[in-house]
């Protein structure tokens, strides 16, 4: 039995597997399909996304004027995705920053509170010391 070959339509991107080249005709465009220089096994091992990308590349390679038309929206789309991802990242960083500032604010408050307590304690000790001094003076 002859091995299956991968064929694709350079007009619409349709692809199919055929044993005989004479059967390789696009069912949508009714034109002969182009044989892909890759074994059927290797091709079917690819993900559907990778297959689409490969055939898209093949079509673009075959028609340079088409390349501009196809890659331009693709680039735009990628930029849109990039802008979306970056915006999300900035929002995440803003949220993180806010959290950090809140933590810092809380830490400041806590430290300030501790300092005030320490100061109060110091003053209390001072007062006790002077009271003690007064008491010893009176006793003497
Ligand atoms: Zn076609």
Image (cartoon, grey):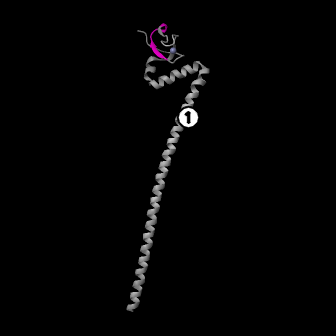
Residue 49: x, y in percent?
Answer: 47, 25
Residue at numbered disc 1:
79
Q: How many marks?
A: 1
Q: Does residue 44 belong to the magenta stretch?
A: no
Residue 123 image-quadrant placement: bottom left
Image quadrant for the C terminus? bottom left
Horizontal side of residue 135 vs 25, given as left or right: left
Q: Is residue 52 above or below residue 87?
A: above
Q: Residue furthest bottom?
A: 140
Residue 58: x, y in percent?
Answer: 54, 20
Q: Which residue is drawn at the image coordinates 46% and 55% (left, top)? A: 102
Of the pair 13 and 23, the residue shown nearer to us: 13
Label 1, residues with CA under 10 Å away: few <14, some 14-19, many ≥20: few
Q: Residue furthest right?
A: 65
Q: Which residue is drawn at the image coordinates 40% and 84% (left, top)? A: 131
The magenta span reads 14-22
Q: For numbered disc 1, what is the local secondary structure?
A: helix
Residue 50: x, y in percent?
Answer: 48, 25
Q: Is residue 16 above or below residue 73?
A: above
Q: Residue furthest top?
A: 22
Q: Which residue is drawn at the image coordinates 39% and 88% (left, top)? A: 136
Residue behind label 1 places its C-beta within 8 angstroms of ligand 1: no
Of the pair 58 and 82, the residue shown nearer to us: 82
């Amino acid at each position: 039995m002859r091995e299956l070959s991968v064929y694709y339509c350079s007009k619409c991107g349709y692809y199919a597997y055929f044993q005989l080249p004479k059967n390789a005709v696009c069912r949508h465009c009714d034109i002969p399909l182009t044989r892909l220089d890759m074994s059927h096994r290797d091709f079917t091992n690819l993900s559907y996304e990778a297959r689409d990308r490969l055939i898209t590349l093949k079509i673009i390679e075959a028609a340079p004027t088409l390349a501009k038309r196809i890659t331009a929206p693709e680039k735009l789309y990628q930029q849109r995705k990039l802008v979306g991802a970056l915006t999300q990242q900035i929002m995440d960083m803003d949220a993180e920053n806010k959290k950090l500032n809140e933590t810092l604010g809380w830490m400041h408050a806590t430290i300030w509170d501790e300092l005030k307590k320490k100061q109060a304690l110091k003053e209390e000790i001072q007062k006790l010391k002077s009271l003690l001094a007064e008491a010893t003076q009176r006793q003497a």
